[in-house]
Image (cartoon, rainbow, N blue to C red):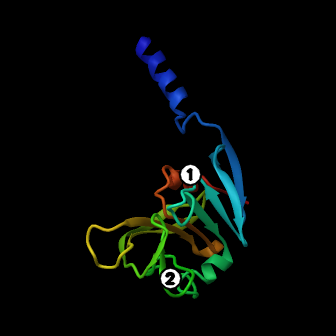
C-alpha cells in the first residue's frame, strides 16, 4: 500500500507521459496527441513542434519538424526526398544542429525499417548518425531520425531523439 502511494506520487510529480495532459496538433490530414507543454511554430508551410529549450548554442530549438509535400519535394540538396540520404533541404554545407556551426559533416545510416504512422499508414523510418566534422573522431555528432509516409507526402524530421515520438506518431489519427 505504501509502495503504491509512493509510486503514484512519484509519477505525478515527475510528469510521467502516461499521466501528462495532452493537446492535439493537426497537420496535413493527421492529428497527433502531444504533451500540452509542447509548442508549435509555423515554418513556411511546415510546422515545427518545440519540445523543450531553445539554446543559443544550437541551430534549432529541441523538437521536430512536420513537413508536407514541399518538404518532401526539396528534402535532399534541393531535390526530392531520397531514403539513401539524410534530410538536408539546402545545397552546400550542412548545419550542425547541436553546435550551431556549418560543416561538411558526413552521415552514416544506422538503420531503416517500417514504422506505424497511425491506423492504416506505414512510414519508412531511417536513422542517421551525423558527424559535425567529417571523418574526425571524438567530435560533436547528432542523430537524425526521419519518418516518411510516401502516399501522403509527409515527412517528420527529428534531430533531438525526442522521447516517445515513435509512439506518438504510431497513434496518429488520419482524416
Report the residue at 67% width, 77% height from top: 69
Report the residue at 69% width, 45% height from top: 23
| Residue 115 sits above or below residue 105 on the image | above
What is the number of callouts on the image?
Answer: 2
CA gap between label 1 and label 2 equals 30 Å
Camera-side residue of 44 and 136: 136
Camera-side residue of 8 and 138: 138
Report the residue at 66% width, 43% height from top: 36
Name the image quarter holding residue 31. bottom right
Name the image quarter holding residue 110. bottom left
| Residue 149 sits above or below residue 160 on the image | below
Residue picked out by circle 2: 82
**Left of 150 or right of it: where is 103?**
left
| Residue 69 sits above or below residue 11 on the image | below
Direction front: furthest residue? 56
> How crowded is the residue under tag 2: few (<14 C-alpha within 10 Å), some, or many (20+)?
some
Report the residue at 41% width, 65% height from top: 142
Dividing the image into 4 quarters, which one contains the N terminus? top left
Camera-side residue of 38 and 31: 38
Q: Are marks 1 and 2 in contact (CB under 8 Å)?
A: no
| Residue 101 sits above or below residue 34 on the image | below
Name the image quarter holding residue 72. bottom right
| Closer mark to the observer between disc 1 and disc 2 | 1
Direction top: furthest residue? 1
Looking at the rendered structure, the secondary structure element under dot 2 is loop
Q: Position of residue 136 (x, y in %)?
A: 28, 76
Residue picked out by circle 1: 53
> How crowded is the residue under tag 1: few (<14 C-alpha within 10 Å), some, or many (20+)?
few
**Left of 165 or right of it: where is 133?**
left
Q: Earlier in the sequence, mark 1 or mark 2?
A: 1
Amino acid at each position: 500500500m505504501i509502495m503504491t502511494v509512493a509510486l503514484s506520487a512519484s509519477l505525478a510529480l515527475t510528469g510521467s507521459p502516461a499521466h501528462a495532459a495532452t493537446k492535439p496538433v493537426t497537420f496535413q490530414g493527421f492529428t497527433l496527441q502531444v504533451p500540452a507543454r509542447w509548442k508549435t511554430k509555423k515554418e513556411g508551410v511546415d510546422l515545427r513542434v518545440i519540445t523543450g529549450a531553445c539554446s543559443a548554442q544550437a541551430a534549432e530549438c529541441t523538437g521536430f519538424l512536420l513537413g508536407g509535400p514541399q518538404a518532401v519535394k526539396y528534402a535532399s540538396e534541393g531535390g526530392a526526398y531520397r531514403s539513401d540520404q539524410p534530410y538536408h533541404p539546402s545545397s552546400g554545407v550542412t548545419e550542425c544542429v547541436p553546435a550551431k556551426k556549418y560543416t561538411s559533416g558526413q552521415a552514416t545510416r544506422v538503420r531503416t525499417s517500417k514504422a506505424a504512422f497511425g491506423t492504416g499508414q506505414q512510414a519508412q523510418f531511417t536513422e542517421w548518425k551525423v558527424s559535425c566534422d567529417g571523418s574526425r573522431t571524438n567530435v560533436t555528432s547528432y542523430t537524425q531520425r526521419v519518418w516518411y509516409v510516401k502516399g501522403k507526402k509527409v515527412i517528420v524530421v527529428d534531430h533531438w531523439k525526442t522521447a516517445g515520438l515513435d509512439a506518438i506518431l504510431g497513434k496518429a489519427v488520419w482524416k
